Image: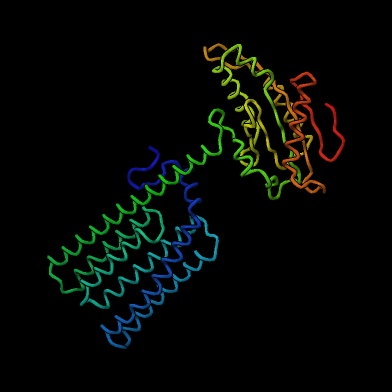
Protein backbone atom coordinates (compact mmCIF):
# COMPACT_ATOMS: atom_id res chain seq x y z
CA UNK A 1 0.00 0.00 0.00
CA UNK A 2 1.64 3.27 -1.08
CA UNK A 3 -0.83 5.63 0.65
CA UNK A 4 -0.27 6.69 4.25
CA UNK A 5 -3.05 5.20 6.42
CA UNK A 6 -3.34 8.31 8.60
CA UNK A 7 -2.92 11.29 6.27
CA UNK A 8 -4.04 9.71 2.99
CA UNK A 9 -0.91 11.04 1.23
CA UNK A 10 1.48 9.03 -0.92
CA UNK A 11 4.30 7.49 1.10
CA UNK A 12 6.85 8.09 -1.66
CA UNK A 13 7.87 11.74 -1.75
CA UNK A 14 8.42 11.69 -5.52
CA UNK A 15 4.93 10.33 -6.16
CA UNK A 16 3.35 12.82 -3.77
CA UNK A 17 5.20 15.64 -5.53
CA UNK A 18 3.94 14.44 -8.92
CA UNK A 19 0.38 14.34 -7.60
CA UNK A 20 0.59 17.82 -6.09
CA UNK A 21 2.08 19.30 -9.26
CA UNK A 22 -0.61 17.60 -11.34
CA UNK A 23 -3.32 19.15 -9.12
CA UNK A 24 -1.61 22.51 -8.61
CA UNK A 25 -3.70 24.53 -11.06
CA UNK A 26 -6.92 23.18 -9.56
CA UNK A 27 -5.56 23.74 -6.04
CA UNK A 28 -4.72 27.38 -6.76
CA UNK A 29 -8.17 27.99 -8.23
CA UNK A 30 -9.89 26.45 -5.19
CA UNK A 31 -7.69 28.43 -2.81
CA UNK A 32 -8.42 31.70 -4.59
CA UNK A 33 -12.17 31.09 -4.70
CA UNK A 34 -12.42 30.02 -1.04
CA UNK A 35 -10.36 32.91 0.29
CA UNK A 36 -12.35 35.41 -1.79
CA UNK A 37 -15.60 33.94 -0.48
CA UNK A 38 -14.34 34.00 3.12
CA UNK A 39 -13.11 37.61 2.75
CA UNK A 40 -16.57 38.82 1.74
CA UNK A 41 -18.35 37.02 4.57
CA UNK A 42 -15.78 37.94 7.20
CA UNK A 43 -16.33 41.63 6.37
CA UNK A 44 -20.08 41.13 6.11
CA UNK A 45 -20.27 39.90 9.70
CA UNK A 46 -19.21 43.38 10.86
CA UNK A 47 -22.96 44.07 10.81
CA UNK A 48 -23.31 41.71 13.77
CA UNK A 49 -20.57 43.61 15.63
CA UNK A 50 -22.50 46.85 15.25
CA UNK A 51 -25.74 45.10 16.25
CA UNK A 52 -24.11 43.70 19.41
CA UNK A 53 -21.93 46.64 20.48
CA UNK A 54 -23.40 49.66 18.76
CA UNK A 55 -21.36 52.13 16.73
CA UNK A 56 -18.33 53.16 18.75
CA UNK A 57 -14.67 52.45 19.54
CA UNK A 58 -15.31 48.78 20.37
CA UNK A 59 -17.02 48.15 17.04
CA UNK A 60 -14.26 50.02 15.21
CA UNK A 61 -11.60 47.84 16.84
CA UNK A 62 -13.43 44.77 15.55
CA UNK A 63 -13.65 46.40 12.13
CA UNK A 64 -9.88 46.77 12.21
CA UNK A 65 -9.50 43.05 12.93
CA UNK A 66 -11.87 42.14 10.13
CA UNK A 67 -10.09 44.45 7.68
CA UNK A 68 -6.78 42.79 8.63
CA UNK A 69 -8.28 39.40 7.80
CA UNK A 70 -9.76 40.75 4.56
CA UNK A 71 -6.43 42.27 3.48
CA UNK A 72 -4.54 39.08 4.32
CA UNK A 73 -7.03 36.68 2.72
CA UNK A 74 -7.62 39.01 -0.22
CA UNK A 75 -3.90 39.29 -0.92
CA UNK A 76 -3.50 35.53 -0.64
CA UNK A 77 -6.47 35.03 -2.98
CA UNK A 78 -4.94 37.44 -5.50
CA UNK A 79 -1.64 35.54 -5.35
CA UNK A 80 -3.49 32.26 -5.90
CA UNK A 81 -5.41 33.65 -8.87
CA UNK A 82 -2.69 35.72 -10.53
CA UNK A 83 0.68 34.19 -9.68
CA UNK A 84 2.08 30.74 -10.64
CA UNK A 85 2.58 29.70 -7.02
CA UNK A 86 4.56 26.56 -6.27
CA UNK A 87 3.11 23.83 -4.07
CA UNK A 88 5.16 25.07 -1.11
CA UNK A 89 4.08 28.68 -1.68
CA UNK A 90 0.43 27.67 -1.97
CA UNK A 91 0.59 25.90 1.38
CA UNK A 92 2.32 28.90 2.95
CA UNK A 93 -0.39 31.22 1.63
CA UNK A 94 -3.13 28.93 2.97
CA UNK A 95 -1.46 28.65 6.38
CA UNK A 96 -1.01 32.43 6.72
CA UNK A 97 -4.63 33.13 5.76
CA UNK A 98 -6.00 30.50 8.17
CA UNK A 99 -3.79 31.63 11.06
CA UNK A 100 -4.64 35.33 10.70
CA UNK A 101 -8.37 34.62 10.35
CA UNK A 102 -8.51 32.40 13.44
CA UNK A 103 -6.30 34.75 15.47
CA UNK A 104 -8.56 37.73 14.73
CA UNK A 105 -11.59 35.55 15.45
CA UNK A 106 -10.26 34.96 18.99
CA UNK A 107 -9.92 38.73 19.46
CA UNK A 108 -13.49 39.27 18.28
CA UNK A 109 -14.90 36.63 20.63
CA UNK A 110 -13.28 38.28 23.64
CA UNK A 111 -14.81 41.66 22.67
CA UNK A 112 -18.26 40.03 22.50
CA UNK A 113 -18.19 37.70 25.56
CA UNK A 114 -21.94 37.34 25.92
CA UNK A 115 -22.23 35.34 22.70
CA UNK A 116 -19.76 32.49 23.13
CA UNK A 117 -22.38 29.91 22.16
CA UNK A 118 -22.68 31.64 18.78
CA UNK A 119 -18.91 31.99 18.56
CA UNK A 120 -18.60 28.23 19.07
CA UNK A 121 -20.89 27.65 16.12
CA UNK A 122 -18.88 30.10 14.02
CA UNK A 123 -15.64 28.37 14.99
CA UNK A 124 -17.08 24.98 14.03
CA UNK A 125 -17.89 26.33 10.55
CA UNK A 126 -14.41 27.84 10.25
CA UNK A 127 -12.83 24.51 11.21
CA UNK A 128 -14.79 22.74 8.48
CA UNK A 129 -13.50 25.33 6.01
CA UNK A 130 -9.92 24.82 7.25
CA UNK A 131 -10.11 21.04 6.89
CA UNK A 132 -12.04 20.77 3.63
CA UNK A 133 -12.16 23.97 1.59
CA UNK A 134 -8.81 25.70 2.00
CA UNK A 135 -6.33 23.35 0.29
CA UNK A 136 -3.42 22.70 2.62
CA UNK A 137 -1.42 19.76 3.87
CA UNK A 138 -3.58 17.80 6.31
CA UNK A 139 -0.96 17.95 9.07
CA UNK A 140 -0.83 21.76 8.80
CA UNK A 141 -4.60 22.14 8.72
CA UNK A 142 -4.99 19.82 11.71
CA UNK A 143 -2.40 21.69 13.75
CA UNK A 144 -4.05 25.05 13.02
CA UNK A 145 -7.56 23.75 13.77
CA UNK A 146 -6.59 22.01 17.01
CA UNK A 147 -4.58 25.00 18.27
CA UNK A 148 -7.58 27.23 17.58
CA UNK A 149 -9.83 24.84 19.51
CA UNK A 150 -7.36 24.60 22.38
CA UNK A 151 -7.23 28.39 22.58
CA UNK A 152 -10.95 28.98 22.25
CA UNK A 153 -12.17 26.76 25.10
CA UNK A 154 -10.10 28.50 27.83
CA UNK A 155 -11.26 31.88 26.51
CA UNK A 156 -14.86 30.71 26.81
CA UNK A 157 -14.25 29.50 30.36
CA UNK A 158 -12.59 32.81 31.33
CA UNK A 159 -14.69 35.43 29.57
CA UNK A 160 -18.19 33.96 29.26
CA UNK A 161 -20.89 33.34 31.81
CA UNK A 162 -21.37 29.77 30.61
CA UNK A 163 -21.57 27.02 33.21
CA UNK A 164 -18.88 24.38 33.46
CA UNK A 165 -21.24 21.82 31.91
CA UNK A 166 -21.96 24.13 28.96
CA UNK A 167 -18.27 24.85 28.46
CA UNK A 168 -17.43 21.15 28.60
CA UNK A 169 -20.19 20.30 26.15
CA UNK A 170 -19.01 23.03 23.79
CA UNK A 171 -15.42 21.77 24.01
CA UNK A 172 -16.44 18.20 23.28
CA UNK A 173 -18.51 19.29 20.29
CA UNK A 174 -15.52 21.20 18.90
CA UNK A 175 -13.35 18.12 19.38
CA UNK A 176 -16.00 16.17 17.46
CA UNK A 177 -15.88 18.74 14.64
CA UNK A 178 -12.09 18.38 14.52
CA UNK A 179 -12.35 14.60 14.44
CA UNK A 180 -14.87 14.46 11.62
CA UNK A 181 -13.10 17.27 9.77
CA UNK A 182 -9.84 15.30 9.92
CA UNK A 183 -11.53 12.06 8.81
CA UNK A 184 -13.31 13.79 5.93
CA UNK A 185 -10.09 15.48 4.77
CA UNK A 186 -8.23 12.17 5.05
CA UNK A 187 -10.89 10.44 2.97
CA UNK A 188 -10.71 13.18 0.35
CA UNK A 189 -6.92 12.80 0.22
CA UNK A 190 -7.18 9.05 -0.32
CA UNK A 191 -9.88 9.30 -2.99
CA UNK A 192 -7.97 11.97 -4.91
CA UNK A 193 -4.73 9.98 -4.83
CA UNK A 194 -6.39 6.69 -5.74
CA UNK A 195 -7.98 8.45 -8.73
CA UNK A 196 -4.57 9.87 -9.69
CA UNK A 197 -2.97 6.44 -9.34
CA UNK A 198 -5.68 4.81 -11.48
CA UNK A 199 -5.28 7.52 -14.11
CA UNK A 200 -1.50 6.95 -14.15
CA UNK A 201 -1.99 3.19 -14.60
CA UNK A 202 -4.44 3.71 -17.48
CA UNK A 203 -2.19 6.34 -19.06
CA UNK A 204 0.80 3.99 -18.85
CA UNK A 205 -1.21 1.14 -20.37
CA UNK A 206 -2.44 3.39 -23.18
CA UNK A 207 1.02 4.72 -24.03
CA UNK A 208 3.34 1.79 -23.37
CA UNK A 209 4.02 -1.58 -24.93
CA UNK A 210 3.22 -4.20 -22.29
CA UNK A 211 6.17 -6.46 -23.14
CA UNK A 212 9.07 -4.00 -23.34
CA UNK A 213 7.83 -0.91 -21.48
CA UNK A 214 8.67 1.27 -24.49
CA UNK A 215 6.20 3.76 -25.88
CA UNK A 216 3.79 2.39 -28.47
CA UNK A 217 2.77 3.75 -31.86
CA UNK A 218 -0.31 5.37 -30.38
CA UNK A 219 1.97 7.54 -28.25
CA UNK A 220 4.14 8.26 -31.28
CA UNK A 221 1.23 9.49 -33.38
CA UNK A 222 -0.73 11.36 -30.69
CA UNK A 223 2.08 12.78 -28.55
CA UNK A 224 5.30 12.97 -30.54
CA UNK A 225 4.16 13.68 -34.09
CA UNK A 226 4.15 17.38 -34.79
CA UNK A 227 6.20 18.24 -31.68
CA UNK A 228 9.76 17.30 -32.63
CA UNK A 229 11.52 20.21 -31.01
CA UNK A 230 12.24 21.00 -27.37
CA UNK A 231 12.27 24.59 -26.16
CA UNK A 232 15.84 25.80 -25.93
CA UNK A 233 17.24 22.71 -27.70
CA UNK A 234 19.41 22.72 -30.81
CA UNK A 235 17.24 22.87 -33.99
CA UNK A 236 17.90 19.26 -34.94
CA UNK A 237 15.80 16.13 -34.97
CA UNK A 238 17.33 12.69 -35.42
CA UNK A 239 15.39 9.46 -35.85
CA UNK A 240 16.98 6.04 -35.37
CA UNK A 241 15.01 3.04 -36.62
CA UNK A 242 16.49 -0.31 -35.62
CA UNK A 243 15.46 -3.92 -36.22
CA UNK A 244 16.76 -7.13 -34.64
CA UNK A 245 18.36 -9.26 -37.35
CA UNK A 246 16.85 -12.66 -38.17
CA UNK A 247 14.40 -12.46 -35.28
CA UNK A 248 12.13 -15.11 -36.78
CA UNK A 249 15.06 -17.50 -36.69
CA UNK A 250 15.52 -16.77 -32.99
CA UNK A 251 11.86 -17.60 -32.33
CA UNK A 252 12.05 -20.77 -34.47
CA UNK A 253 15.27 -21.97 -32.82
CA UNK A 254 14.78 -21.00 -29.18
CA UNK A 255 11.02 -20.46 -28.88
CA UNK A 256 8.89 -17.37 -28.40
CA UNK A 257 9.72 -17.15 -24.69
CA UNK A 258 13.39 -16.64 -25.44
CA UNK A 259 12.41 -14.34 -28.29
CA UNK A 260 10.62 -12.15 -25.75
CA UNK A 261 13.79 -12.13 -23.64
CA UNK A 262 15.75 -10.83 -26.63
CA UNK A 263 13.14 -8.13 -27.25
CA UNK A 264 13.16 -7.01 -23.62
CA UNK A 265 16.94 -7.02 -23.50
CA UNK A 266 17.19 -4.92 -26.66
CA UNK A 267 14.52 -2.50 -25.41
CA UNK A 268 16.23 -2.13 -22.03
CA UNK A 269 19.50 -1.27 -23.76
CA UNK A 270 17.79 1.39 -25.89
CA UNK A 271 16.00 2.91 -22.90
CA UNK A 272 19.21 2.99 -20.85
CA UNK A 273 20.95 4.92 -23.65
CA UNK A 274 18.27 7.63 -23.97
CA UNK A 275 17.13 10.45 -21.72
CA UNK A 276 13.41 10.22 -21.12
CA UNK A 277 11.33 12.39 -21.32
CA UNK A 278 13.51 14.49 -23.65
CA UNK A 279 14.09 11.46 -25.85
CA UNK A 280 11.72 8.59 -26.55
CA UNK A 281 11.99 4.90 -27.42
CA UNK A 282 9.00 3.53 -29.35
CA UNK A 283 8.26 -0.09 -30.19
CA UNK A 284 7.50 0.55 -33.84
CA UNK A 285 6.70 -3.01 -34.92
CA UNK A 286 7.31 -6.59 -33.86
CA UNK A 287 11.10 -6.36 -33.50
CA UNK A 288 11.49 -2.79 -34.76
CA UNK A 289 12.21 0.10 -32.40
CA UNK A 290 12.24 3.81 -33.04
CA UNK A 291 14.36 6.38 -31.18
CA UNK A 292 13.17 10.00 -31.32
CA UNK A 293 16.06 12.32 -30.45
CA UNK A 294 15.18 16.06 -30.43
CA UNK A 295 18.20 18.35 -30.34
CA UNK A 296 20.54 15.63 -31.67
CA UNK A 297 22.39 16.14 -34.96
CA UNK A 298 23.40 13.44 -37.42
CA UNK A 299 26.91 12.92 -36.04
CA UNK A 300 25.72 12.31 -32.49
CA UNK A 301 22.90 10.09 -33.77
CA UNK A 302 25.29 7.92 -35.77
CA UNK A 303 27.67 7.59 -32.84
CA UNK A 304 24.80 6.52 -30.59
CA UNK A 305 23.55 3.99 -33.14
CA UNK A 306 27.02 2.55 -33.60
CA UNK A 307 27.49 2.23 -29.84
CA UNK A 308 24.12 0.47 -29.55
CA UNK A 309 24.97 -1.85 -32.42
CA UNK A 310 28.28 -2.89 -30.87
CA UNK A 311 26.82 -3.28 -27.37
CA UNK A 312 23.94 -5.47 -28.53
CA UNK A 313 26.17 -7.67 -30.70
CA UNK A 314 28.47 -8.26 -27.73
CA UNK A 315 25.68 -8.99 -25.25
CA UNK A 316 24.84 -12.56 -24.29
CA UNK A 317 21.35 -12.76 -22.84
CA UNK A 318 20.24 -15.35 -20.30
CA UNK A 319 17.69 -17.75 -21.82
CA UNK A 320 14.58 -18.96 -20.03
CA UNK A 321 16.46 -22.03 -18.80
CA UNK A 322 18.99 -19.83 -16.98
CA UNK A 323 21.83 -20.38 -19.44
CA UNK A 324 23.43 -17.29 -21.06
CA UNK A 325 23.28 -18.36 -24.69
CA UNK A 326 21.11 -15.84 -26.57
CA UNK A 327 22.96 -13.60 -29.00
CA UNK A 328 21.63 -11.37 -31.76
CA UNK A 329 22.55 -8.38 -33.86
CA UNK A 330 20.57 -5.40 -35.12
CA UNK A 331 20.54 -3.11 -38.13
CA UNK A 332 20.16 0.67 -37.79
CA UNK A 333 18.93 3.47 -40.01
CA UNK A 334 19.70 7.03 -38.88
CA UNK A 335 18.05 10.07 -40.45
CA UNK A 336 18.54 13.66 -39.32
CA UNK A 337 16.80 16.87 -40.26
CA UNK A 338 17.51 20.51 -39.46
CA UNK A 339 14.18 21.89 -38.27
CA UNK A 340 14.85 25.39 -39.57
CA UNK A 341 15.54 24.13 -43.08
CA UNK A 342 12.87 24.96 -45.63
CA UNK A 343 11.02 22.29 -47.55
CA UNK A 344 9.85 20.03 -44.67
CA UNK A 345 6.13 20.20 -43.98
CA UNK A 346 6.32 17.29 -41.52
CA UNK A 347 9.97 16.79 -40.52
CA UNK A 348 9.37 13.90 -38.13
CA UNK A 349 7.33 11.91 -40.62
CA UNK A 350 9.95 12.56 -43.31
CA UNK A 351 12.76 11.50 -40.96
CA UNK A 352 10.94 8.30 -39.95
CA UNK A 353 10.36 7.35 -43.60
CA UNK A 354 14.02 8.00 -44.41
CA UNK A 355 15.24 6.04 -41.36
CA UNK A 356 13.00 3.14 -42.39
CA UNK A 357 14.56 3.05 -45.88
CA UNK A 358 18.04 3.27 -44.38
CA UNK A 359 17.37 0.43 -41.97
CA UNK A 360 16.33 -1.85 -44.86
CA UNK A 361 19.38 -0.67 -46.75
CA UNK A 362 21.49 -1.86 -43.81
CA UNK A 363 19.72 -5.22 -44.03
CA UNK A 364 20.52 -5.49 -47.74
CA UNK A 365 24.13 -4.53 -47.14
CA UNK A 366 24.76 -7.43 -44.77
CA UNK A 367 22.94 -6.60 -41.51
CA UNK A 368 24.57 -5.62 -38.19
CA UNK A 369 25.45 -2.18 -39.53
CA UNK A 370 24.42 1.48 -39.48
CA UNK A 371 23.28 3.48 -42.51
CA UNK A 372 22.67 7.21 -42.18
CA UNK A 373 21.51 10.27 -44.07
CA UNK A 374 21.19 13.99 -43.55
CA UNK A 375 17.84 14.95 -45.07
CA UNK A 376 18.10 17.70 -47.59
CA UNK A 377 21.67 16.68 -48.45
CA UNK A 378 23.29 13.79 -50.29
CA UNK A 379 23.12 10.42 -48.53
CA UNK A 380 26.37 9.30 -46.97
CA UNK A 381 27.37 5.69 -47.11
CA UNK A 382 28.67 4.16 -43.94
The count of marks equals 0
x and y, in percent, of residue 183 in the image: 29, 52
Quick check: 220 above or below 109? above
Q: Residue at x 62, y 15 (%)?
A: 250
**Can you say which quadrant of the picture contains the C terminus?**
top right
The residue furthest bottom is 55
x and y, in percent, of residue 72 in the image: 44, 70
Q: Residue at x 50, y 57 (%)?
A: 25
Q: Nearer the viewer, residue 142 or 331?
A: 331
x and y, in percent, of residue 7 in the image: 35, 48
Left/right placement of residue 316 relative to residue 130 reads right
Left/right placement of residue 137 relative to residue 310 reads left
Left/right placement of residue 230 relative to residue 62 reads right
**Can you say which quadrant of the picture contains the N terminus?**
top left
x and y, in percent, of residue 141 in the image: 36, 57
Residue 184 location, quadrant: bottom left
Residue 194 location, quadrant: top left
Q: Nearer the viewer, residue 113 or 362?
A: 362
Q: Nearer the viewer, residue 286 or 196?
A: 286
The residue furthest right is 378
Quick check: 66 above or below 251? below
Amino acid sequence: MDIHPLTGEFLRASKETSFLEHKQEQTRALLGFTLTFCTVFYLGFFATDVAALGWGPAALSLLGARVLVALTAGTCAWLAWRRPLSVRATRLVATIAESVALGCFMFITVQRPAEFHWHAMSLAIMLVVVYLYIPNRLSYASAIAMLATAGFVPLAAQHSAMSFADTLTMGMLLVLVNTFGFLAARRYNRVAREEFRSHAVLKYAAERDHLTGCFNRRYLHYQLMGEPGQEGAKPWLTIILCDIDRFKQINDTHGHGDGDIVLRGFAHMLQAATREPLESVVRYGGEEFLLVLPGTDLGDGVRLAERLRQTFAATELVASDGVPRLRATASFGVASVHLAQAGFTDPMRDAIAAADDLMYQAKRNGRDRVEYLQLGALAQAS
